[in-house]
Image: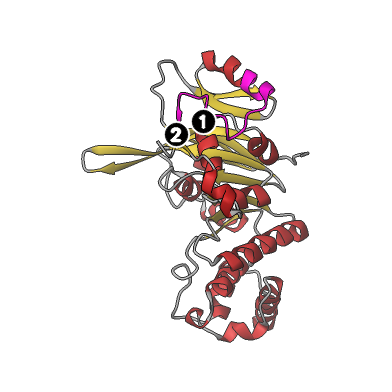
Amino acid sequence: MDHGSELLRVEGLQQIFQSGSKAVRAVDDISFSVFRGETFGLVGESGCGKSTTGRTIIQLYKPSNGKIYFEGTDLASLRGKKRWQQFRRDVQMIYQDPYGSLNPRIKIREIIAEGIDVHGLARNAKDRELQVAGLLETVGLNPEHANRYSHELSGGQRQRIGIARALAVQPKLIICDEPISALDVSIQAQIVNLLKKLQREKQLTYLFIAHDLSMVKYISNRIAVMYQGKIVELGEAKELYRSPLHPYTESLLSSIPYPDPDFEKHRNRLLYKQPAHTEESKLHEVVPGHFVFCAPSEVPLYQTKHELGATVSNTASPFLVSAAN
């Protein structure tokens, strides 16, 4: 893929929460970039820190450490209401729960128009109404939905409202925080196809957070795999699926269901056992564009693994065991 210019850069990001006397490292020193026009997938199991990463980028949480740059500007250096308002217009979020993220007390019209009002994007009441109607049509709903309340809509329709609300302020980056995990499987593909269509039409950039690797592969250009607050592998989507290198990524890929009962009956799922690293481990570029979290001495081993063509059926790693054991 030919990437556009860098839109977002995260450097050494940490998010530490205090739980009594215990410090929990939800995000533990991660770095990555997102380029204009791409979809950057961030995947991992529940509790790995992926949603916390998204919420820290959009400043729902203040980072404990590290830097976040948007269009080359360090967010820590932003001063003044006007600059913060512009950032909040440029970066929007689509939330996981389409039921809890919409205000049930106001009509859909007001939910979508909230950002339009805050940022003064409508010339008058008629223009505001036209913008709301246009946004509803853009996400596949009828203008008549503007008069309804969120409880009158299905889960898929509510998530379309969430997408329309994000689009209303013409953002540059949308953080999609598991936007399909609460939806029926039959609706998930519709929402993902809508997001891909909008990206093409409006030159959007997505940070797509999810635990469903099969769907992330479908929508993402590059993918970062998170485990216990760290990124353990990062690379082009096709490359990562074709040749997973880190044992945890192999474990995740082995858990993706396949629509064949006979295959599922005999397939070998792999469980990951976290190693105790004795050296300083970090993300290393094992092959061009493909990064793995490992110690320096392990880099040649992963390079050899890549040359041999790693597959999820490979159980040679001491950090993978059969789920049947």
Where the N terminus falls, by quadrant? top right
Q: Which residues are magenta?
A: 303-321
Residue 286, x across and y down, in percent: 63, 22
Most extreme residue toward the left, as rendered?
Answer: 21
Mark 1 vs 2: CB contact within 8 A:
yes
Report helix, strand or loop for mark 2: strand
Q: Residue at x 64, y 67 (%)?
A: 168
Marks 1 and 2, how far apart at CA: 7 Å
Residue 181, x across and y down, in percent: 51, 59
Instruction: Determine which quarter of the picture holds residue 196.
Output: bottom right
Say which of 70 and 250 sits in front: 250
Task: Please give left or right for residue 252 compared with residue 64 in the image.
Answer: right
Q: Around disc 1, counting alpha carbons within 10 Å, would you say few (fewer than 14), some (14 to 19), or many (20 or more)? A: many
Report helix, strand or loop for mark 1: helix
Q: Amino acid at mark 2?
A: Tyr
Taking the magenta stretch, the answer to whether it contains residue 297 is no
Disc assigned to residue 272? 2
Residue 120, x across and y down, in percent: 62, 69
